[in-house]
Amino acid sequence: MGVAVAGCGASDASQDVDDTPTKFTPLPDGRPDVSHFPSAKTTGPQPSTDLRVVGETTVRKAGELVENVEIHGKLNIEANDVVVRNVRVIGEGDWAIIQRQGASGAVLSNLEIKGNGTTKVDTAVLNQGGQITIRRADIHTVSNGITTDHGVIENSYLHDFKEFPGDHIDGVQIGGSPMAGLSLTVRHNAILNQVAETSAIIIGQDFSRTHDVLIQNNLLGGGGYTVYGGEGKFGVPTDIKIMDNVFSRRFYPKGGMYGPVAYFTDKGKGNTFSGNVWEDDGKPVTP
C-alpha cells in the first residue's frame, strides 16, 4: 500500500468550520434562490492544488493529515481525529473512503470522490466508526454517496450516480440509530439522484430504530421517493427534522419517480416536516 500522510494535531480539524446557512433565501416571485447551493465550482480539491498520485492508503496513527493527493483505490481510516483535505479518490469496490469501527473524529474537506465509470464503487464514504464530518465534497460516478448514522454532512454536491445491475442508489444512507450521544446533521448540500431507485436521502431502519436526524436547507431531487423519512420495523422514529429544504422536479414531475417523501410520521416525539418548498414555484411540499 502507498501511504501518503503527514502528522498534524487536532487543531487542524477545528479550524475547518463553515458558516453554513440554515434556510434558503426566497426570490421576489416566491421561488427559492438555488444559486447558493453547492456545485462542482464550490466543492472538491482547491483548483490551485497539485495532487500527487498514490495507491491505496491506510491511516493508523491518530491525528494524521492526508493532504494534496490523488488516491487510486481506497482510503482506509483506522485511527482517531484523522484530517483529510484537498484529496481526490478514484475508488473501487465496496467503498472509496472508510472510517472503520473503533475510529472516530475524521474531518474530510475539499474532496472529490468518484469511480472511473467502469469499475463499481458501491459507497463513496462508509462510516462504521464514530463521529465524522464531511464538507465541500464533490461525489459522483458512484452507486451510493455517504453511509453513516451520525456526523455532519455540509456544503457538499452529490450527483450523477452510476447505476449497476441490481443497485439501489442513495445519496445519503442512514441505517438506524446513531451512537449514544451523537446525531446526524445533513445541511446545505445539493443531493440530486437522477436514478429512479432509491432516494436522495434515506432514513431507514435496517439495523435499529432511527432518531436524531436533522435534514435542513438542502437541494434535493430524484430517486423513487426523494426522501425516506424514518419509519420502519424497529419502532416509531423520533427527532427526525426535515426542514427548509428545496425539492426539485428536474428529474421527475413528482420530485422522485413516485413522490417527494415516503415513510415520514409526525407521531414520533420531535418529528418535524416544515418549511420545505418546490424549486420551480416555491409552493409547500407535503409528506
Image (cartoon, grey):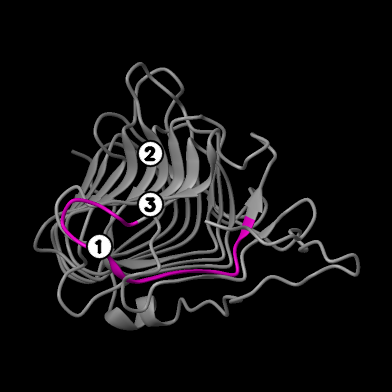
Q: Is residue 243 magenta?
A: yes
Residue 219 is situated, as x and y percent measured from the top left of the image, at 61, 55
Q: Is residue 208 left or right of residue 11?
A: left
Q: Is residue 119 magenta?
A: no
Residue that badge 2 annotates: 144
Residue 241 is situated, as x and y percent measured from the top left of the image, at 43, 71
Among the two numbered marks 3 and 1 on one chain, the one whose residue lies closer to the N terminus: 1
Q: Between 209 and 141, which is closer to the camera in this rendering?
A: 209
What kind of residue is marked 2?
Asn
Residue 55 is situated, as x and y percent measured from the top left of the image, at 29, 36
Can residue 264 be seen in this snapshot? Answer: yes
- Placement of 131 over or under 42, stated as above or below: below
Q: Is residue 207 left or right of residue 269?
A: left
Q: Residue at x 31, y 78 (%)?
A: 269
- Read off the magenta span: 230-246
Element class at badge 1: loop
Q: Are marks 2 and 3 in contact (CB under 8 Å)?
A: no
What kind of residue is marked 3?
Tyr
Q: Residue at x 31, y 40 (%)?
A: 96
Q: Residue at x 76, y 63 (%)?
A: 32
Residue that badge 3 annotates: 263
Among the two numbered marks 2 and 3 on one chain, the one whose residue lies closer to the N terminus: 2
Q: Between 74 and 117, which is closer to the camera in this rendering?
A: 117
Residue that badge 1 annotates: 210
Q: Nearer the viewer, mark 3 or mark 1?
A: 3
